[in-house]
Amino acid sequence: MKIIPLWLHKLSSPPVFYRFAGALRPWFLWSALILAAVALYGGLVLAPADYQQGDAYRIIFIHVPCAWMGLFAYFCMAVAALIAMVWRIKLAEVVAMECAPIGAAFTLITLVTGSLWGKPMWGTWWTWDARLTSELVLLFLYLGVIGLFNAIEDRRRAARAASLLALVGIVNLPIVHYSVIWWNTLHQGQTVRLLGPSKIAPAMLWPLLLMALATHLYFFASLLARSRVGLLALEGGKDWARALIGEKAHA
Amino acid sequence: MNTASLVPAQQAMTRTPGTLAAIRALLRRELLLAWRRRADALFPVLYALIVVSLFPFALGPEDALLARISGGVLLVTVLLAMLPSLESLFRGDLEDGSLEQMLLAPQPLPLLVLVRVFAHWTTTTLPLIVVMPLLAVLLRLPAQVLPVLIVALLLATPLLALLGAILSALTAGTRRSAILLALMLLPLAVPVVIFAAGAVAAAQSGLPYLAPLLWLAAALILALVLAPFASASALRIAAET
């Protein structure tokens, strides 16, 4: 009958999610690590050097998946934030807030690897190019959400306020993106396409896609672990959390 | 009997003031409060004057250089001068309880927020635009660019005030929120600054400047519709405790 809605409803209860996430996390984490190792071997050893950029291009195997993850994490945060705002589900609030630091870290890695690549290729660490600027704005959006969440003392009110900010941000993100393109562009265009042929050699493409898969899995592993801690911090006074901590203390 | 005479009395007791009357009352209250502390309206102007007069000291007083950067400098100065007053937009209302009155009022909260933002813009930001010709002269802005700058500001500053009102409502319950507000406003301000500065730069180099102004106008209309609703739900979150 309504097995899936019932299961989802049960899953949104903190103790059930805590156990579920704990059981799921190792699978995500280990598959992410193994796939990342294979992808790095494929990207750094097996893939041929670029005829123009030499070996310097190999940083894309970190840079591009992290850039995708920066956006993906924001999207996940916004979806969780919407659920938190509309249905006021405690779990969604925690998940939305735990997305932000992971997404900020991925965005920071994108900016750092991008500037490391930019120095030999463009001859500069930083330039006010459209994509770089959008990425910087994305980082500021993340920092705003994290800052607002930490500024309000009541945890649930803080989560809802920061969720609203995340939703304002997702309306703003495309506007920022297109306005900075109109303003200035230097970054190379899109090379990997979902539909239609990509403009990249297959030997370079498969490590890139594998790495993207690995970063997604890592994101979920990290999100599950962080949400467990977040739930425990939020529900510290509840029976299930006390029982859990008691078990750990006795063992 | 008596029942007939009771009905009008009951009606009078339960009758609420109309939306227009509420708007008029709120507007009157805000403007009166601002008038009673009219020296406060000078602070953003003084702030802008200080920032603008520091630039020639830092960059050197060459007319050509100042004229080239003045449009952008004036825009950023206005944006910075708006920040301190935005921070406290809803704080007083939250502390003295008038925010609760707004939340409980039978009139739609987004509408009341819109009136509130309009009053705030009129009392804190409009004086900045009024003194803009003076600041423009100090920075040697070419005379034909000044009208474009003023139109750009008339479109950009209400937009920033509406966006800032959302953030101000979000931070209403927190202490030391000035830096936080600046951090949150930066991503929202980027497109506004790009289009406003784009119009000014185009006017300065003799290019058509209408397109960026129309973009700003479109964004302002969008914000007029959407931002009051976001501010209203942010205020409801802030008043929950």
Image: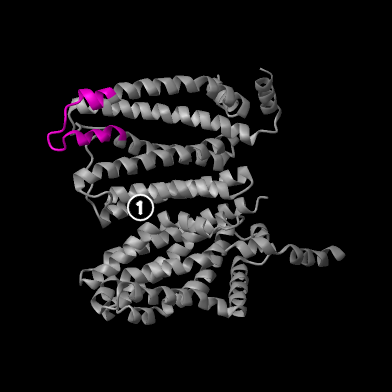
Q: Tell me, yes or no, whether the highlighted magenta stretch contains residue B10.
A: no
Residue B73 sits above or below residue A199 on the image: below
Residue A247 sits above or below residue B161 on the image: above
Q: How many numbered marks are there?
A: 1
**Could you tell whether A136 is left or right of A91 in the image?**
left
Q: Chain of mark 1?
A: A
How crowded pointer 1 is (Cα within 10 Å; few <14, some 14-19, many 20+) is rated as many
Q: Which residue in the protein does label 1 denote?
A: A176
Give residue A58's position: percent from left, percent from top.
23, 33
Which residue does the image show at 63% across and 48% down from the upper left?
A: A153
Give residue B214's position: percent from left, percent from top.
32, 64
Q: Quadrant of the C terminus of chain A?
A: top right
Q: What amino acid is at disc 1?
A: Val
**Could you tell whether A114 is left or right of A142 in the image?**
left
Which residue does the image show at 69% across and 23% down from the upper left?
A: A246
**Colouring of the image:** one colour
Depth order, front residue of A86/B188? B188
Depth order, front residue of B174/A37? A37
Give residue B144's position: percent from left, percent from top.
26, 79
Question: Does residue A145 appear in this view?
Answer: yes
Give residue A52's position: percent from left, percent from top.
13, 37
**Residue A73 falls in which quadrant of the image?**
top left
Q: Quadrant of the N terminus of chain A?
A: top right
Question: Does residue A167 appear in this view?
Answer: no
Q: Residue furthest right?
A: B1
Which residue does the image show at 20% across and 47% down from the upper left?
A: A122
**Could you tell whether B71 is left or right of A50 in the image?**
right
Q: Which residues are magenta?
A: A41-62
